[in-house]
Image: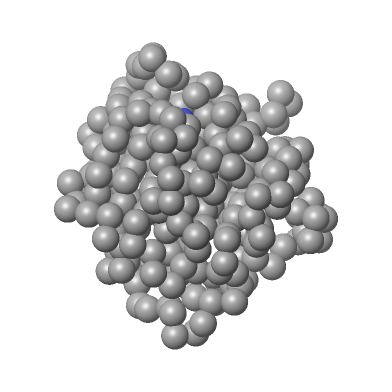
Amino acid sequence: MELWYTEKQTEVFGITAKIKQTLHTEQTPFQKLDMLETEEFGNMLTLDGMVMTTERDEFVYHEMVAHVPLFTHPHPKQVLVVGGGDGGVIREVVKHPEVEKVTLVEIDGAVIEQSKKHLPHIASAFDHPKVEVIVGDGFMHIAESHNEYDVIMVDSTEPVGPAVKLFEKGFYEGISRALKADGLFIAQTDNPWFKADLIRQVIGDVKEIFPITRLYTANIPTYPSGLWTFTMGSKVYDPIEVEEGRFHDLKTKYYTKELHKAAFVLPKFVKDLAGE
Ligand code: SAM
């Protein structure tokens, strides 16, 4: 008997993957957590039926979440990751020698536990000396932080359940307060094919708070539509004005200094969406 996992990306469209076996499934206090072994993409973490990350294509998202803001900021010493319980973003963050500390605030400890067990290549930096892990609500952590971080990365689930408030204007205002005077943040902001209204709302809110607001993209085959966006809000530094000398060698599979700038060149329908 064949087993297929299907994620309904809209009510009438989805993605389906042939499954070898279900490795783990549980209802945590926050969401339904499933770890699946797929034929095409290796082990796959889903939360509430949505693909979070897979062994085969995870590097795209985690490199683009981490390296674009960390090369944009000239001295990213204090870094915060909201969400990110699979560990992929902090694995990339600790590759930057300038980073002194990265704090990860993940609301669901089960995500960390199962990622360590079934996604060891992704969840490989939790014990790094520069990493602090807090199991808690990122919204509350931001509300309690002031003038503390150089870079903040919001690596959350889509705006469902505990992540709903991570896409609201009040959260971005809190991020601004949590950042230092020259700080910047990025947030994953879903896809322009099925979530155009969300992107329009987030961009509009961030523009009212940060002097520099930009959208960039990456290709992630297992995410809805495959075209993924990230929104950056920056108090001082412009991601497309990074000095050539700022880039240093880094072991990556997707990110390059050329792609850093190219990612901000948007297709016309996305440019219009971003109000650029
Ligand atoms: N790359 C994925 C994406 O783009 O959808 C996100 C992966 S990461 C596993 C998302 C994490 O955000 C989940 O582990 C979830 O538990 C966490 N999360 C959701 N709401 C949160 C909150 N309010 N505070 C902290 N973590 C939260």
Q: How many marks?
A: 0
Is any part of residue 200 visible from this angle? Answer: yes
Residue lying at 49% horizontally and 84% vertically, measured from the top left: 244
Is any part of residue 91 visible from this angle? Answer: no
User: In terms of image quarters, where does ligand 1 lie?
Assistant: top left
Determine whether, in the image, residue 224 is placed left or right of residue 89. right
Q: Nearer the viewer, residue 84 or 48?
A: 84
Q: Nearer the viewer, residue 45 or 269?
A: 269
Residue lying at 31% horizontally and 30% vertically, measured from the top left: 135
Q: Nearer the viewer, residue 118 or 6?
A: 118
Q: How far across and how far down the image is residue 137, in percent?
A: 41, 28
Q: How far across and how far down the image is residue 130, in percent?
A: 22, 54
Q: Nearer the viewer, residue 174 or 264?
A: 174
Q: How far across and how far down the image is residue 214, in percent?
A: 66, 59
Tell me: residue 45, above or below residue 184: above
Determine whether, in the image, residue 110 is placed left or right of residue 213. left
